[in-house]
Image (spheres, rainbow, N blue to C red):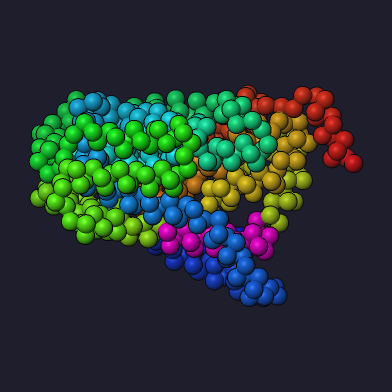
Amino acid sequence: MLAVMLVILGVGVIKFGLSPQTPVLVVIGLLVLWAKLRGSSWDDISDGIVSGVKNGIIPIFIFILIGTLIGTWIAAGIIPSMMVAGFHMISVRWFIPSVFLVCALIGTSIGSAFTIISTIGIALFGMGQTLGMNPALVAGAIISGAIFGDKTSPLSDSTNLAAAIAEDDLFAHIKNLMWTTIPAFIISLVLYAIIGNSGTNAGMGKINTTLNVLNSNFVISWWAILPIALLFICAIMKIPAIATLILNVTVTVGMIFIEKPNTPVKDIAGFIENGFVSKTGNASVDALLTRGGITSMMGTVSLIFLTLSLGGLLMKFDVIQTAMAPLAERLKTPGSVVTATILSGIGVNIFVGEQYLSVILPGKAFKTTFNKRGLDNLALSRVLEDGGTVINYLIPWGVAGAFAANTLGVPTLSFLPFCFFSLLSPILSIISGFTGIGLRKLPETDKASSDKVVTA
């Protein structure tokens, strides 16, 4: 069943270039038919869909708020101001590695890859377009940096989840992540420096034209930093994402009224509902800054709804759990346990498309096996992040992958080869499993007691 699902998803998206919604819907139909043939009731099927979608209500609401934030941030001149400041501060020659570093550092402070991609990421992407950079390469650097920040921040939901599933201390978990995260970061930075070195002949004429257009059509000011600073303050105060975004949109709307007191309320509602429509007369700038709004997120929301429904059905009928159980019993060495957990996380991302489940399911399936093979819970939590959280951005029908593609306007399969951090993390984790480098093991006393419990 899983093999057939994978073929349908892969062929539909990769071979025929379809949007993920249609293949996912076909797979859901196939799964419902399979469940009925096995004697399941319609109530069971409905319960599976409802339980799956229920877990995604908060992320869906957050995506709607992010669409609102993008539209209002452009209208208030915040993203244009970031672009103008960026052109004066970031090295043109080393633009791609600079993008990776900026997103990584700010992401670590905020702890939300989605927020980085949809705010600072859009500004950096616009700069890259102006410089004539490969859009897929720029998107890959933005997403890689955002993922690094999300993975290493104590404010990150996914990082807290991995530590909780493995039942270990959050800060010990983050410290232990560095064994694979720092090498992946350094290698990614070197690759971006090599591939993204644009030389010294970047088109300054085009940059100056873009700067003139931005200064002429948007309010470019120092106080554009206010909503950005507000994100940091809310992160430090550990204010939930929904409250943070609502507060930020409110402050941004206030800025619009201060900058342009005669702005009709209907226009503000338009920014919120349909996004900002740039009318500068410069085609490239208009293409970059015509975006945002609730409606812009509806494609992503529909995909999330479908993938969560699929995940709920797979969980309800124990499809993935049943496939994992026999595998866990056959693993005899630390390297094989780590590899199997990584592949399981990738598999859940492919079949379910939800990054939280890619941590939860393998974590529950392999926790006993890790301890039985003398591996500490910290080893498990690191592997869950390396094979679960970071991979979701590479799946076209994944929640994170669809969000990044929709926000930046670059197909997932286009930026996938340039998301070096996501590609390197599972590889380095598997190497750690077989070499033992950085692989936390249980003290002998703990291992002995674990073996007794398993034997009993």
- Residue at 16%, 28% (x, y): give it: 201
The N terminus, quarter of image = bottom right
x and y, in percent, of residue 179 in the image: 57, 25
Q: Position of residue 394 (x, y in %)?
A: 45, 46
Q: Is residue 23 above or below residue 323?
A: below
Image position, residue 31 (x, y; %): 59, 68
Query: In the image, is residue 232 above or below residue 282?
Result: above
Q: Is residue 324 left or right of residue 33?
A: right
Which quadrant, please, contains the C terminus?
top right
Q: Residue at x 21, y 57 (%)?
A: 265
> Is 318 part of what is drawn in magenta?
yes
Q: Residue 365, percent across and down?
A: 70, 47
Residue 140 visible in the current orientation: no
> Splitting the image into 4 quarters, where does residue 113 fall?
top left
Q: Nearer the viewer, residue 51 or 267?
A: 267
Q: Does the magenta run of residues contain 328?
A: no
Q: Nearer the viewer, residue 211 or 437?
A: 211
Q: Is residue 249 visible?
A: yes
**Closer-to-camera residue (11/5):** 5
Magenta stretch mostly in which secondary structure? helix
Residue range (magenta): 301-320
Residue at image position (24%, 58%) is 270
